[in-house]
Amino acid sequence: MEDLSSFPENTFGFVYKIKHLPTQKMYIGKKVLHHQRKTKLTKKDLALYEGQPGRKPKYKVIKKESDWKTYYGSNKSLLELLKTEPIENFERDIITLSPNKKLLTYYETKWLFVYQALEKPEEFFNDNILGKFFTSDFDMWN
């Protein structure tokens, strides 16, 4: 996907897989397409509401495109590799798209379980799911 127009309408975000080609080790994560934040209205913004009935708003929502084109995840080991190796050593693929935040988290979790990412630390950079399930939880079985 090259730009936002490449995505179907109402796409909130996507689940992606990054593969380190020399080792074939992978990372699964999620990314939103836009960031939203509330910002206080300026005097100029408030002037637009002068003379209108009802309570004036105090905030407006700013929507901004995220860094989805260049994002490679939050895993420390993966980010260290990205600093030392050429970008050509990494392959990024979108696994699935999502229409909202809740399903985005569901799909990321689903794919981490489907790929058994925590059970295969030699194949995946991921070391936890939702901050609740950890690779170390499986150590007692080995």
Image: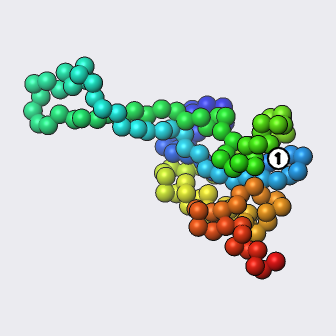
Q: Observer-nearest residue: 136 or 71?
A: 136
| Quadrant including the N terminus | top right
Q: Residue furthest right?
A: 22
Q: Observer-nearest residue: 58 or 2?
A: 58
Residue at the disc numbered 1:
20
Decide: is 41 above or below 102. Answer: above
How many marks the image carries: the answer is 1
- Identify the residue shown where x is 77% and y is 39%: 82
Q: Amino acid at mark 1?
A: His
Decide: is 105 above or below 76. Answer: below
Q: Position of residue 70 (x, y in %)?
A: 67, 34
Q: Is residue 24 left or right of residue 44?
A: right
Q: Position of residue 87 (x, y in %)?
A: 80, 35
* Picture quadrant of residue 73: top right
Estimate how packed mark 1 is, as few (under 14), some (14 to 19) or many (20 or more) residues with alpha carbons within 10 Å.
many
- Identify the residue shown where x is 50% and y is 50%: 99
Q: Is residue 120 left or right of residue 133?
A: right
Q: Observer-nearest residue: 55 or 97?
A: 55
- Identify the residue shown where x is 63% and y is 68%: 133
- Identify the residue shown where x is 34% and y is 33%: 39
Q: Is residue 53 left or right of residue 75?
A: left
* Residue 6 seen in the current view: no
* Residue 32 seen in the current view: yes
